[in-house]
Image (cartoon, rainbow, N blue to C red):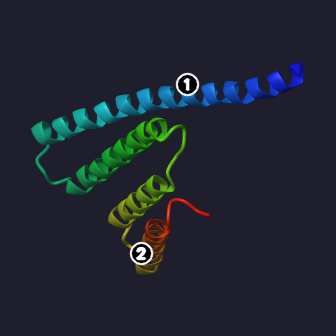
Amino acid sequence: MKLMFKNLEFPKLLQNILNLSLILLSIVLCFLLTKEILHFIEFVIYSDGTDFHSFLEKILIFFLYFEFISMIVKYFKENYHFPLRYFLYIGITAMIRLIMVNHENPTNTLIYALVILTLIIGYYIINRTPRERP
């Protein structure tokens, strides 16, 4: 009987470690998100507006931080479960960022676009599949 109690304690311990780690990660991401906002303000005030490529890259990084924070919030709201949809959102956003930043090679851009298409098809399949399975 005591062994069964220990087996129930271990998953709870791991769940608590995971929750604490995600809370710490969200604090770090909030700090980095705030840092990016300060970079935006600095760019608007002190820049002459010619380095638009760098500004666009910082905007996309800002949204990646925002998506990860929202995914952690969704994890706690969904009863300790990461919805697959959010991983697809982050993947699509990351691939779009990659295309915007590295678009010199047309073959790579085509491959990135096919990856985005695959992620969108996967998202469509997830939305068409019923949530409750028999």
Give the label, 1 or 2, closer to the camera. 1
Q: Nearer the viewer, residue 70 or 126?
A: 126
Q: Nearer the viewer, residue 51 or 85?
A: 85
**Would you call the spot at circle 2 few (<14 residues within 10 Å), some (14-19), or many (20 or more)?**
some
Left or right of residue 44: residue 127: right
State the quadrant of the C terminus.
bottom right
Q: Nearer the viewer, residue 36 or 25?
A: 25
**For the residue labelled by badge 1, is the local secondary structure a helix, a strand or a loop?**
helix
**Would you call the spot at circle 1 few (<14 residues within 10 Å), some (14-19), or many (20 or more)?**
few
State the quadrant of the N terminus.
top right
From the viewer's perspective, is residue 68 above or below residue 105? above
Residue that numbered label 2 is attached to: 113
Residue that numbered label 1 is attached to: 20
* Count of number-bearing discs: 2
* Amino acid under disc 1: Leu
Identify the residue at the far front of this view: 134
Q: Nearer the viewer, residue 28 or 4?
A: 4
